[in-house]
Image (spheres, grey):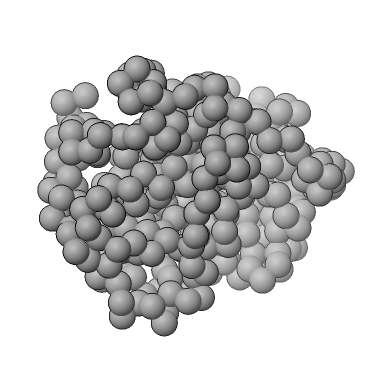
Amino acid sequence: MKELLNNTKKLQKILLNLSGLRIGLITHKNADPDALASIYVLREFLQARKNYTYLFFPEGLNSTSKYLLNKLGLTLEYYKVEYGKYMDHLIDYYVIVDTSNSVQLGDLGKIIQNKCIVIDHHHPGDLFRKCYHSLVVKLTSTSELLYFVLENIWYFSSISATLLLSGMLYDTRRFIYVDKYTFYTANELINKYSADYSKALEGLHKEMDLAERIARLKGAQRLILKRYNDIIVTITHVSAFEGSVARSLIELGADAAFVVSSNDKLRIVGRATKLFVQKTRISLGRDIMPKIGKLINGEGGGHDTAGVAEGKGSLKQGLKVIEKVLNSLLSNYTK
């Protein structure tokens, strides 16, 4: 705990010195509840310091985040990323949460690098060294990390605490994946700041709509199965809901699943079990997605059991690249 708190001290000082400024808050594409919670709470803190904030959500919020906002009776106004280049001259600093990969920021990733701060829990991406300051700590969620950043300099409202708890629940898959601080943080949010556990949980229980269900079934129908000794990896392609499809393949029995889509960009989403990481000592965010990103002329990153890569190329090329990277990393794998 002491080491974690020491890591946050420099960022705390930086945030406390931000006053009377215009600050852009950004997160990754299709923002999930962890990203949403982190931006919402950070905005509350910065506005209390008399800063003006601009929110940017590349490709908007994912369906669960929208549902969560609705269940909590909240609304959030934000700008489209394409407006960023016209607004950049107004903004003094950018704070990026829940990603440190510029590819996840759309067009904004090209213009913010000289005046940005990163707060993230994934493996460090290209912005880690390019930004003015970066705090990247391997916790289970950015919501958890942000709690430690702000706990000594801010008093969370009940709604902010509930959002942070929702972000933690989402990224830990309802506390399946935890670190040594997770339950301490959840306890603090509930008992000290009156986070509503029931509301946090209910806000994540969104029923799948027809389009998502169809995408999952198409993903299963098209899958390629690869076996490396006792490790089973699946590869498939859909046009949307890549993360949901990957999770469904893990639930079917895959150790790792990769889902390709090719719309305006080539996008590859990966998910893996914790057992896959333990057995192979291979991390999606550290070892697989950056390699894939490089091979498709883009970027890739994430954390051990979840990652994404974006770049250029056809669907067929994307599928081949995944197989190439997997073969290079797993062909010699033995139990």
Which residue is painted at 25% across and 50% down in the image? 48
Vertical comparison of 273 with 142: above or below:
above
Q: Residue furthest front?
A: 73
Identified at 31% across, 34% down, the residue is: 156
**Does residue 48 appear left or right of residue 313 in this picture?**
left
| Image side of residue 312 versus residue 78, left or right | right
Is there any visible trace of residue 197 in the rendered image? yes
Towards the viewer: 4 or 153: 153
The quadrant the N terminus occupies is: top left
Residue 63 appears at what percent x and percent y? 65, 47
- Against 289, residue 298 (above or below) is below
Quadrant containing the C terminus is top right
Q: Is residue 299 visible?
A: no
| Quadrant of res 84 | bottom left
Asked where in the image residue 229 lies, by quadrant, the reply is top right
Task: Where is residue 6? Give x, y as percent.
Answer: 14, 35
User: In the rendered view, does 25 fall on the left or right side of 60?
Assistant: left
Looking at the picture, how far across and down is residue 130, in whole percent? 28, 64
Q: Is residue 103 left or right of residue 20?
A: right
Q: At 39% from the left edge and 37% from the top edge, which residue is drawn?
A: 160
Residue occupying image coordinates x 30% and y 77%:
90
Q: Position of residue 213 (x, y in %)?
A: 81, 41
Q: Is residue 281 above or below residue 85?
A: above
Q: How many marks?
A: 0
Residue 179's image quarter? Answer: top left
